[in-house]
Image: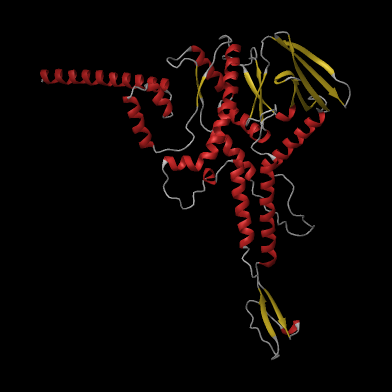
């Protein structure tokens, strides 16, 4: 157990170092010499693209797909207070790097704000969380432990804090502990969580059967390919530094007889003297080809095609079907993530609504945005055909990226303003008629 946890911590550290571009340099640098190491951080690109396509646009929630309810309004307000899509992007970023996403649900603080108070959702560092699993059921968690390093705000002394969350009948017992200077653990507080579900929620980034912890976007094979790319580019950079400029060499002449400055005339006083340029015979095409192959392999293994990074080359204008084919690996990967993170969102919304006093049985329906850019004209033509087939206006507006309730409110406001203008025109017209009659 301790060995597994240590290996997991080391894997998380390697992934975060790669994401931040802090992995070891591929070439050694001697004191006083130039640093030829080249860093191309594909690791960050892979994770950020995965987060962007998953939570780059708003995900909407509904409880009743036929009408707007008070619980839906409260849930929207709650998500605005806890950070909305920014919180989900942080959650997915942790999942992309570490393979597992964790969040902690906290009740609203009494008197914390002057307005309505809402529950809080805190994104947890996966490296700070440990779990105990039932010996016969990998899905059954028998305890959670959240442990992290801290600093005493009064003395500045380092300390370690941890929180145990264990089941206690139909509730959960929360025990806060602290250790100073490597000493024994001291209990700070014990609290009985008044709900049947734990205040911690999690999901796998990508599903990994037979394991509790999920699969990251930055597994060791991806990190290895990224390191190989850096190594090839660094060697190319060093070769070019040494051999990009031709070197002049001479035979049959002494050094003081030779002046090869830019504005000088080269004179060779000896008929047998020779003067040549030593140039690199290769254009490094084999090394550049190796870099291209490694880059292609990285995009294939990570399921993030180059077209998703904005590199189109000379493909010209693409149809919707062509884009789907090019994006297919990333689409498939994101669909899998939507199932994992979607289940977390549904359960998280249920817990938030229970904390808000709306009961324990609320299940939200998620509406995910469209992944790929599309032809706006073609999309609206299809929407008109769907409307003729009987598809509701709410569904069509959601597919087009609009909020149906907000659009209805705007239309009512526009109609009211049009009515006011019409009355003003009528009154103004009557006033003009009266003036004409008096004249």
Give the quadrant of residue 382: top left
> In the image shown, does 282 or 332 lie closer to the viewer?
332
Residue 351 lies left or right of residue 10; in this view the side is: left
From what the image shows, is residue 49 above or below residue 239?
Answer: above
Measuring from the top left, give residue 10's x and y in whole percent. Answer: 76, 36
Residue 316 lies left or right of residue 239; in this view the side is: left
Residue drawn at (53%, 33%) of the image = 56
Measuring from the top left, give residue 295's x and y in whole percent. Answer: 61, 50
Which residue of the protein is positioned furthest toward the bottom in this rendering? 271
Quadrant placement of the N terminus: top right
Give the quadrant of residue 52: top right
Residue drawn at (63%, 61%) of the image = 286
Does residue 396 show up? yes
Residue drawn at (81%, 19%) of the image = 177
Quadrant placement of the C terminus: top left
Residue drawn at (68%, 82%) of the image = 275
Measuring from the top left, give residue 362's x and y in whole percent. Answer: 55, 13
């Amino acid at each position: 157990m301790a060995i597994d946890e240590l290996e997991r911590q080391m894997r998380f550290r390697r992934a975060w170092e790669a994401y931040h571009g802090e992995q070891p340099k591929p070439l050694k640098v001697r004191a006083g010499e130039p640093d030829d190491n080249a860093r191309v951080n594909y690791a960050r690109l892979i994770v950020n693209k995965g987060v962007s396509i998953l939570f780059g646009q708003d995900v909407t929630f509904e409880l009743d797909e036929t009408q707007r309810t008070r619980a839906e309004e409260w849930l929207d307000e709650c998500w605005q207070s806890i950070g909305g899509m920014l919180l989900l992007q942080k959650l997915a970023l942790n999942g992309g790097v570490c393979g597992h996403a964790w969040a902690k649900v906290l009740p609203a603080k009494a008197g914390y704000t002057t307005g309505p108070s809402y529950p809080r959702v805190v994104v947890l560092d996966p490296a700070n969380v440990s779990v105990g699993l039932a010996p016969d059921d990998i899905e059954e968690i028998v305890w959670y432990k959240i442990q992290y390093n801290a600093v005493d705000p009064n003395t500045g002394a380092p300390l370690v804090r941890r929180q145990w969350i264990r089941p206690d009948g139909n509730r959960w017992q929360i025990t806060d502990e602290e250790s100073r200077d490597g000493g024994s653990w001291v209990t700070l507080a014990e609290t009985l969580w008044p709900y049947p579900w734990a205040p911690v929620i999690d999901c796998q980034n990508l599903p990994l059967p037979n394991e509790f912890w999920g699969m990251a976007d930055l597994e060791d094979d991806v990190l290895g390919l990224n390191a190989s790319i850096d190594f090839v580019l660094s060697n190319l950079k060093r070769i070019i530094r040494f051999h990009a400029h031709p070197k002049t060499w001479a035979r049959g002449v002494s050094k003081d007889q030779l002046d090869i400055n830019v504005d000088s005339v080269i004179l060779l006083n000896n008929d047998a003297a020779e003067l040549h340029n030593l140039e690199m015979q290769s254009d490094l095409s084999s090394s550049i080809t190796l870099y291209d192959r490694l880059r292609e392999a990285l995009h294939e293994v990570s399921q993030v095609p180059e077209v998703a990074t904005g590199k189109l080359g000379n493909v010209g204008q693409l149809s919707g079907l062509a884009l789907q084919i090019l994006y297919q690996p990333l689409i498939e990967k994101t669909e899998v993530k939507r199932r994992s993170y979607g289940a977390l969102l549904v359960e998280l919304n249920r817990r938030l609504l229970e904390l808000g006093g709306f009961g324990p049985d609320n299940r939200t329906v998620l509406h995910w945005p469209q992944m790929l850019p599309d032809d706006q004209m073609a999309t609206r033509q299809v929407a008109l055909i769907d409307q003729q087939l009987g598809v509701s206006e709410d569904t069509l507006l959601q597919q087009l990226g609009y909020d149906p309730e907000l659009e209805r409110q705007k239309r009512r406001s526009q109609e009211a303003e049009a009515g006011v203008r019409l009355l003003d025109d009528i009154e103004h017209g009557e006033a003009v008629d009266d003036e004409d009659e008096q004249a």
